[in-house]
Image (spheres, rainbow, N blue to C red):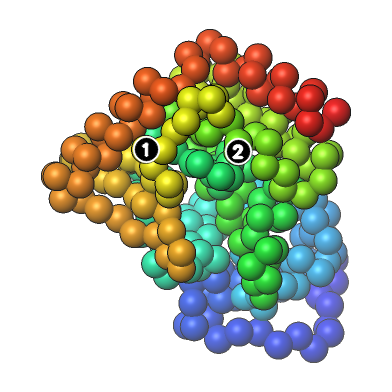
Amino acid sequence: MTVENETVEHADPTLSPLAHFGYEVRLERERLGMSRSELGKEAHCGYSLVAKIEAGDRVPALSFAETCDRVFPYSNGRFERLWPLALRWAFPPWFRRYVELEWIATKLQMFHPLLLPGIVQTEEYARAVLQAGRPTNLDDLVTARMERQRILERERPTRLWLVLNEGVLRNAVGDAAVMAKQLRRLHELAQCPPHVVQIVPTQGNNHLAASPFGLLSFNEGADIVHVDGFPRGYLLADIDDVTMANDAYDLLKSMAAPPDESADMIDSISKDCYS
């Protein structure tokens, strides 16, 4: 194995957790005499992505951190431990606290009136939504959004209860192929305990909530409310706010079709609109 000698600018590792992660990857790779291409092959990615991660320019997926721990001797899980810090750097500062809470939540109750929430978006849907804001770090934002979804699939998953207006499924994001794939994902989720998906039919005339909001529950401690908005969301922990949000969510669930009907509704809309 050889060490590549291209001149690549490396970020100061003290600048951010992301820069520190990249510095540690480069340090261990060069110590092992491994090329970026060789590391990329191990991690099922290309030379370019390895170079960007080392330079602190891209957020790594968890699978990349796991590869580093497997390939580099004596890492002892260091890269997987560093990964959550690097990942949070991809989120806006105001959203990082929410991500921390979401990661440890035992249950999420979410309502969205216009779009699928990030926690259930496919990569293509997420990219179409995020690129509308013309961000300079689109790839990082997409990676971070996809990595958040691990909480739904881990050994002890966070339970998701999702209520959507029917219009969300008919609001085309991207092309028909993007929407068809997204609704397949939602269809699978609706049939996968312990998660629940409910759809408020258009004729239900849901005027209760105009903005997305959610409730996070934990093994210890009170629920917290997250309200999504522009230009930023915010967290509420006051007991009166939490009580009001719980009452509103109960009403939304009562307006929605029963959970057992969700998969058929999703399938029907997909065939009508995107096949």
Front residue of 267/67: it is 267
Left-right relation of 40 to 162: right
- Tell me the element at label 1: loop
Q: Quadrant of residue 234?
A: bottom left
Q: Quadrant of the C terminus?
A: top right
Q: Quadrant of residue 168?
A: top right
Q: Nearer the viewer, mark 2 or mark 1?
A: 1
Dot 1 corresponds to which residue? 208
Q: Residue at x 75, y 27 (%)?
A: 270
Q: Is residue 261 positioned above or below 175 on the image?
A: above
Front residue of 57/113: it is 113
Q: Residue at x 71, y 25 (%)?
A: 269
Mark 2 crowdedness (10 Å alpha carbons): few <14, some 14-19, many ≥20: some
Q: Quadrant of residue 122?
A: top right
Q: Quadrant of the N terminus?
A: bottom right
- Tell me the element at label 2: helix
Q: In the rendered structure, which amino acid carries the disc numbered 2? A: Val
Q: Residue at x 55, y 71 (%)?
A: 18
Residue 204 locus on image (x, y percent): 48, 25
Left-right relation of 173 to 105: right
Whether residue 27 can be seen here: no
Dot 2 corresponds to which residue? 168
Residue 48 locus on image (x, y percent): 81, 69
- Which residue extends farthest left? 239
Q: In the rendered structure, which amino acid carries the disc numbered 1? A: Leu
Q: Is residue 191 positioned above or below 142 on the image?
A: above
Residue 131 locus on image (x, y percent): 69, 63
C-alpha separation, residue under disc 2 versus residue under disc 1: 16 Å
Q: Earlier in the sequence, mark 2 or mark 1?
A: 2
Residue 102 locus on image (x, y percent): 40, 46
Whether residue 181 can be seen here: yes
